[in-house]
Amino acid sequence: ALLAADAVHQALTDAGLTPVDCKSPRMGLLVGHGGPMQEVYQLCHQKADLKKSLTSFALPRAMASTVSANLASWLGVQG
């Protein structure tokens, strides 16, 4: 999350934008994520077929959108 926040700060600086500019309804946020979603999806199906439960670590691994959600909240993005 800290790396993503630093990358956003650098991108805003490069674009000549300020955090105040992010509060516009015309501003959006798109974050790429190389997370293991496919792996978690397959694991869910395997466990369901075997009638077994997932570990408590499966959900956080599947939540790739938390990076963009946290950054959007931090910046006050409305778009």
Image (cartoon, rainbow, N blue to C red):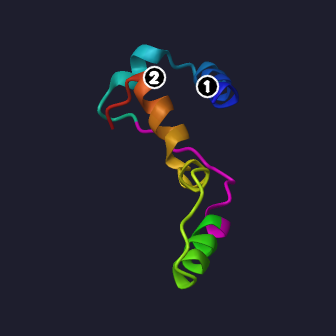
Q: Is residue 12 magenta?
A: no
Q: Nearer the viewer, residue 77 or 33?
A: 33
Image quarter in which the C terminus is found? top left
Q: Residues within 10 Å of mark 2 (few under 14, many from 20)?
A: few
Q: What amino acid is at disc 2?
A: Trp
Please report the residue visible at 45 percent of the width from the left and 22 percent of the height from the top.
74
Disc 1 target residue: 5
Question: Which residues, given as a range, are shown in magenta?
Answer: 28-39
Above/below status of 72 relative to 64: above
The image quarter in which residue 39 lies = bottom right
Please report the residue visible at 56 percent of the width from the left and 71 percent of the height from the top.
44
Q: What amino acid is at disc 1?
A: Ala
Residue 18: where, in percent of width, then height? 49, 15
Disc 2 target residue: 74
The image quarter in which residue 38 lies = bottom right
Q: Determine the secondary structure under disc 2.
A: helix
Q: Nearer the viewer, residue 11 or 4?
A: 4
Task: Using residue 23 as the reference point, say whether residue 70 is left or right of it.
Answer: right
